[in-house]
Image (tube, grey):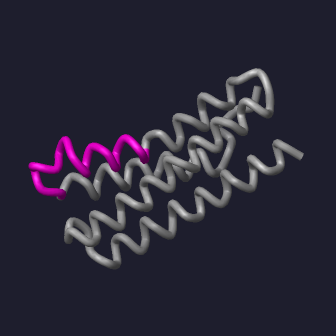
Amino acid sequence: MINYKNLLFWQRSMVFVADIYKKTMSFPREEQFGLSGQIRRAAVSVPTNIAEGSGRDSKKDFAHFLRISIGSACEVECELMIARDLGYINESESSVLLKEIKEIKEMIDSYKNKLLE
């Protein structure tokens, strides 16, 4: 079993979740159960799938959960662009968040590929 807490991409994804929660606090109240809730769930899904997959019996199973985590990261990217286009976050904020989730996604994918070698 792999200790997910030692994985840099898990650590960064945890910080990212906190950043998403902070940013979405300023979204309009009517988005609490809409875009705000959806982007939070997708962001939380990134580190939780890493954690869950690390406890599985095989590298293949772990890689499957890493794929799910990457999918959630892609969802967050899309939702950040929607939030930007709706004016809920500005261009500068969205650029920082999009850059961070892209880097996390690339780290996860690289690790996944090494698992499957």
Q: Position of residue 72 (x, y in %)?
A: 49, 47
Q: Position of residue 93 (x, y in %)?
A: 34, 71
Q: Which residues are magenta?
A: 27-43
Q: Viewer-proximal residue, 71 or 20?
A: 71
Q: Viewer-proximal residue, 95 or 69?
A: 69
Q: Is residue 39 magenta?
A: yes
Task: Name, please, the residue furthest toward the top.
Answer: 57
Q: Viewer-proximal residue, 95 or 34?
A: 34
Q: Position of residue 68 (x, y in %)?
A: 58, 41
- On the rendered structure, is 89 left or right of 56? left
Q: How many marks?
A: 0
- Give me the residue at 69% from left, 54% from top: 109
Q: Main secondary structure of the magenta part?
A: helix
Quarter of the figure with the N terminus: top right
Image quadrant in which you'd find residue 90: bottom left
Check the image and report above or below for 99 versus 49: below
- Give me the residue at 35% from left, 53% from top: 20
- Give me the residue at 56% from left, 35% from top: 49
Task: Name, please, the residue furthest toward the left.
Answer: 29
Q: Is residue 62 magenta?
A: no
Q: Position of residue 113 (x, y in %)?
A: 79, 50
- On the rendered structure, is 74 left or right of 9? left
- Give me the residue at 28% from left, 58% from top: 23
